[in-house]
Image: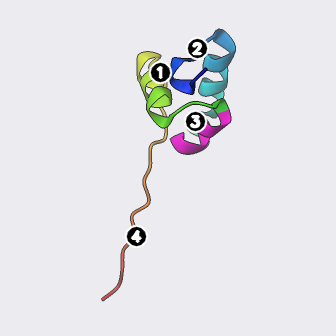
Amino acid sequence: MPSWKKSWNEEDIKKLKSLAGTMPVTMIAKELGRTTGTVLAKAVEQNIPIRHRTDEVTSAS
């Protein structure tokens, strides 16, 4: 079954809560076997603060 169709159970939500704030959302998604979008959507739905950071490359001129 595609990861975007996979239902969330209590264990998944507990794992999301425990991982939130400890690693970037991309790593959490990989750990849970889900897409970044579904992890973010579930975090918002559950009011779980999540670290969503993108590293921008800056060049010195």
The one of 31 and 16 positioned closer to us in this rendering: 31
Task: Return the mark for residue 42.
Answer: 1
Return the disc, 3 or 2, that comes first in the chain's sequence: 2
Quarter of the image with the N terminus is top right
CA–CA distance between discs 2 and 4? 35 Å
Q: Position of residue 10 (x, y in %)?
A: 65, 10
CA–CA distance between discs 1 and 4? 29 Å
Type of the residue with mark 1: Lys
Foreground mark, 4 or 3, reads 3
Q: CB of mark 3 within 8 Å of CB of mark 2?
A: no
- In the rendered structure, the answer to whether residue 11 lies left or right of residue 20 reads right
Q: CB of mark 1 within 8 Å of CB of mark 4?
A: no
Q: Which residue is mark 2?
A: 8
Type of the residue with mark 3: Ala
Q: Is residue 47 above or below residue 21?
A: above
CA–CA distance between discs 3 and 1? 11 Å
Q: CB of mark 2 within 8 Å of CB of mark 1?
A: yes
Type of the residue with mark 4: Val
CA–CA distance between discs 3 and 2? 13 Å
Q: Secondary structure at mark 3?
A: helix
Residue located at (42% from left, 17% from top): 45
- Few, some or many residues within 10 Å of mark 2 (<14, 14–19, 20+): few
Q: CB of mark 2 within 8 Å of CB of mark 4?
A: no
Task: Return the mark for residue 57.
Answer: 4
Q: Which residue is mark 3?
A: 29
Return the disc, 1 or 4, that comes first in the chain's sequence: 1
Return the disc, 4 or 3, that comes first in the chain's sequence: 3
- Few, some or many residues within 10 Å of mark 3 (<14, 14–19, 20+): some
Residue range in magenta is 23-31
